Amino acid sequence: MLKTQNTNKTLATLLVVCILLLQPSALSAQAEGATGKDPEVQDIAQQLKEQRAAIEEVQKKVDAYESKIQAKRNEALSIRNQLDEFGDEIDQTKLKLDLKQKEITEINLTIAETEKRIQAKEEEISGQKEKLSEFVRLLHQRGQKSPIEILLANNAFSEFFDQAQYLETVEGDLSVILKKLKSVHEKLQTEKKDLADERAELLALKNQLQGTQVVLEEKVTAKNVILEATQADEAKFQELLSQVRSEQAKINNDIISLERALRAKLEASGDKTLSELSGQGFMWPVPGRTITSGFHDPDYPFRRYFEHPAIDIRTPQGTPVKAIGSGYVSRAFDGGLGYSYISVIHADGLSSVYGHVSCILVAEDEYVVQGQAIGCSGATPGTPGAGRLTTGPHVHLEIRLNGIPVNPVNYLP
């Protein structure tokens, strides 16, 4: 009888310990307590606090520069105004680089903190599973006895009844414990998902850092291009403005008029090729997909001279430029050391324009198939086809609908 009572007490004590330890709140508190007292975790928390404060300070400086830049853009465009604006934009972009680097450091610290929490929870769950396994083993041994064995082991029927009822209660509590352990495990999975999200954010920030570095290089080049073209002389600057705006207007008018003329010519001849291509999808013109300037990009260095009706895709000088879709060449203009471009008309009122090309491999009215090399990329300042205002090797890609520029990103895969 005494032995039975001692065994019952042992099981009861073990059950209570398991219930208390395996509650999600208890597990969480223990895991957080373990990480909270860890000097390494405390150091990470302090670094995160300092990093976030530094990010806030840099962001304030970036915003202050934005106000200065916007104020200059509201002033009349002059060489001094333009050079000052470029200078502010360069300084602001340097701050943005610093900001991205600090944000990357912050995410790395957050990842380290999350990994510590995951490690603490996994260790806690592992320890509790061992205790639970021992508890289940004892319970299993206890439960192996048949009702007859339990009855014979007790001196009175009331003791037999209490013993049987006790086993039933313990098994019910065990079920509750397992459910709570499952809840803690689910929270652990959430932590792991957060960690995956943080790592994805880190990758995105690293890509943004590279993009910001490209923007900085372009702004520095843009300032140098204007200085070289004008020698900081106001009269030369105003003459340059007049010339590039006139050139842009002529290019736009030529693209529209020649497209209309070619479509009318094909229709008059009964050519149904374009209609048969209806619904074709487009492809990227070069292997790279890094966009350095977007459609009507507010950060385009020369936006105050004319809008940017395209996307600029970074690619090495001389890369084969491929037709994004099948169609007819409506314009293949070789500008010598000026601006050179190719225009192709497609089905459904769409057309594509490829600017700053350093070589042209097709002729006007020629039919080209999707993926065919039609020219070579250019845009390095001072090289054939680059034109007056360019900041580095890339392909200028326009997509037009009924002659009107639309965002190419919406049409590319």
Image (spheres, grey):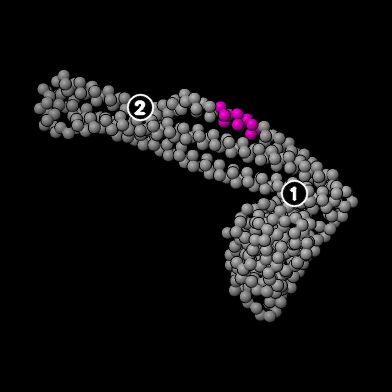
Residue drawn at (75%, 49%) of the image: 221
Q: Nearer the viewer, mark 2 or mark 1?
A: 1
Q: Is residue 12 visible?
A: yes
* Residue type, numbered disc 1: Thr
Q: What is the quadrant of residue 51 in the picture?
A: top right
Give the number of the disc on residue 29: none
Q: Is residue 349 visible?
A: no
- Determine whether the residue tagged by mark 1 lies in a helix, strand or loop: helix
Picture layout, residue 340 above or below residue 106: below
Query: Where is residue 171 shown, x and y percent of the image?
Result: 25, 32
Q: Are marks 2 and 1 in contact (CB under 8 Å)?
A: no
Q: Which residues are magenta?
A: 46-56
Residue designated by label 1: 221
Mark 2 or mark 1: which comes first in sequence?
Answer: 2
Q: Quadrant of the C terminus?
A: bottom right
Q: Is residue 51 magenta?
A: yes
Q: Is residue 22 magenta?
A: no
Along the viewing direction, whichever of 323 and 407 lies nearer the viewer: 323
Q: Is residue 48 left or right of residue 60?
A: left
